[in-house]
Image: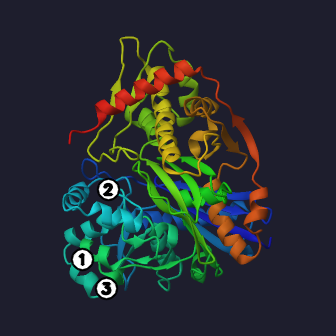
């Protein structure tokens, strides 16, 4: 059983753990959903202790299903929902407030205030990001400002802050290691992605004490070992990456020009730009794709807040479907003569619009519109949003090509109908790999390669295998009409300045 790697995939709605064998195949999986808290309109929180318990439980489940023990595991890799933040007590590890989730919009007024002060170009130049509630920095500032005594305690060095990976590393190592990796750090709004360090000027603007923050390491690095009491033996933690960067790695997008898009709760498309830190002119993000052996690889990223969440809304919000996997079957039955558009701005619009105040809207309803039309509109909204990102990336990067092939992963890509419609709207091939757990696979590869039990990047890339390529089939006239209708719907959804 030697050479096993345990991947912890801590997501927005559930935690998963997967044991991979020495041949990089999953042999044991555990998954557990946890509670979503919505204390106010546009606010989203998680209980950090519930997340922690779900991670420990799923790791034990995965090990049991793999018929292995902690002693068989060479390394742990962690991937996590990015931008979600926790502040906890240094002495006890107890959180002082619920985790504020990446989807949360409560800091929109602060972001607007900073924009009016003319500070967005400064933040963007240093971090590659925009002033939006999506990112971690303003969330940390909010907790310090709104939890009684938090700022005073932070300044005295009694508190620690970090994204979910940092919180898990702290707990897994029994409070011995406070660390993160460069990809998660790059999403905080206070990390300088060129100099690779916490930026004192930005920390001062947001009034965040530097002592709160973790040490920033490479994605494949030494993050300590797990407390023996957790799993029965110490396991080295050797890989960490934010979920979208982990998926980029899992899709073996190691060469400039390669692109992947992950369709989970949200949708996140990353285009590898190599050592070239591209400054977007179309309101995309410049981010760290990964940092290995001290060398930083950059990416252009387009972030869509609602993808799979639109399917969840169909199921849980309006009861159109009983199970998420039914959405594609229902969409295929929709009336082609109806042009129903869903703009899923439930928590605002992400790239390339970045409108925190926009809210969801449906256009084109007729008396004959029903569940099938709603399902198709929800799934098509994901394809349209991806097309907006692809168009912006082609404008931004001179090294880009119109012959883009998109590698996809995430829960939604199991639907053939959805992937075919994506290829049709993009007018580009869409490649679905045989292993859909690419986020967990990316984290596992970071840890496994660091441990020396998995191959290096080039050999790993050769192991990527295609399940199916979806090629565009839609008539260009139909595509153009659909895109025109979508852009009109978005324009009518945007909030007033």
- Report which quarter residue 446 is drawn in: bottom right
User: Where residue 334 appears, x then y in whole percent?
Assistant: 51, 18
User: Where residue 393 appears, x then y in whole percent?
Assistant: 51, 47
Alpha carbon separation for disc pair 3 and 1: 9 Å
Alpha carbon separation for disc pair 3 and 2: 28 Å
- Report which quarter residue 353 is drawn in: top left
Q: Residues within 10 Å of mark 1 (few under 14, many from 20)?
A: many
Asked whether the viewer can see residue 139, the reply is no
Mark sitting earlier along the chain (1/2): 2
Asked whether 62 or 485 is in front, the reply is 485
User: Where residue 18 appears, x then y in whole percent?
Assistant: 65, 60
Report the residue marked by disc 3.
158
Alpha carbon separation for disc pair 1 and 2: 23 Å
Report the residue marked by disc 2.
132
Report the residue marked by disc 1.
150
In this rendering, would 155 be left or right of 75? left
């Amino acid at each position: 059983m030697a050479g096993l790697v345990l991947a912890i995939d801590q997501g927005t709605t559930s935690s998963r753990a997967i044991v991979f064998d020495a041949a990089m195949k999953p042999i044991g999986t555990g998954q557990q959903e946890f509670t979503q808290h919505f204390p106010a309109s546009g606010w989203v929180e998680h209980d950090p202790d519930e997340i922690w318990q779900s991670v420990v439980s799923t790791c034990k489940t995965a090990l049991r299903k793999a018929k292995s023990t902690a002693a068989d595991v060479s390394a742990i890799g962690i991937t996590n929902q990015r931008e979600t933040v926790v502040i906890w007590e240094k002495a006890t590890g107890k959180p002082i407030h619920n985790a504020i989730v990446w989807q949360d919009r409560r800091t929109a007024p602060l972001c607007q205030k900073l924009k009016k002060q003319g500070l967005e170009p400064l933040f963007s130049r240093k971090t590659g990001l925009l002033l939006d509630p999506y990112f971690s920095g303003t969330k940390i500032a909010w907790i310090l400002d709104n939890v009684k005594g938090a700022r005073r305690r932070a300044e005295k060095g009694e508190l620690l802050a970090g994204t979910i990976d940092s919180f898990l590393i702290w707990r897994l190592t029994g409070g011995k290691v406070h660390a993160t990796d460069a990809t998660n750090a790059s999403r905080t709004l206070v990390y300088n992605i060129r100099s690779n360090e916490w930026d004192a000027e930005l920390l001062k603007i947001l009034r965040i004490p530097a002592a709160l923050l973790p040490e920033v390491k490479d994605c494949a690095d030494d993050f300590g070992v797990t407390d023996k009491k957790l799993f029965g033996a110490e396991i080295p933690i050797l890989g960490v990456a934010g979920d979208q960067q982990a998926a980029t790695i899992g899709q073996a997008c190691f060469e400039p020009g390669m692109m992947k898009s992950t369709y989970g709760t949200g949708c996140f498309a990353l285009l590898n730009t190599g050592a070239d830190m591209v400054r977007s002119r179309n309101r995309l993000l410049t981010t760290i794709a990964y940092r290995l052996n001290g060398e930083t690889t950059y990416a252009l990223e387009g972030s869509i807040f609602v993808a799979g969440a639109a399917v969840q809304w169909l199921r849980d919000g309006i009861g159109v479907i009983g199970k998420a996997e039914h959405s594609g079957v229902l969409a295929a039955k929709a009336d082609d003569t109806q042009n129903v558009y869903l703009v899923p701005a439930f928590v605002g619009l992400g790239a390339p619009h970045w409108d925190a105040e926009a809210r969801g809207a449906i256009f084109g309803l007729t008396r004959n519109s029903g569940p099938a039309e709603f399902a198709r509109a929800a799934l098509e909204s994901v394809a349209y949003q991806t097309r907006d990102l692809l168009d912006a990336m082609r404008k931004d990067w001179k090294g880009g090509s119109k012959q883009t092939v998109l590698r996809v992963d995430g829960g939604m890509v199991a639907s053939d109908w959805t992937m075919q419609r994506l290829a049709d709207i993009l007018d580009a091939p869409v490649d679905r790999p045989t292993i859909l757990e690419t986020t967990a696979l990316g984290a596992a590869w970071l840890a496994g390669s660091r441990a020396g039990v998995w191959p290096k990047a080039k050999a790993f890339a050769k192991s990527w295998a295609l399940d199916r390529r979806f090629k565009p089939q839609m008539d260009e006239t139909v595509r153009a009409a659909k895109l025109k209708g979508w852009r009109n719907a978005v324009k009518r959804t945007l909030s007033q300045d």
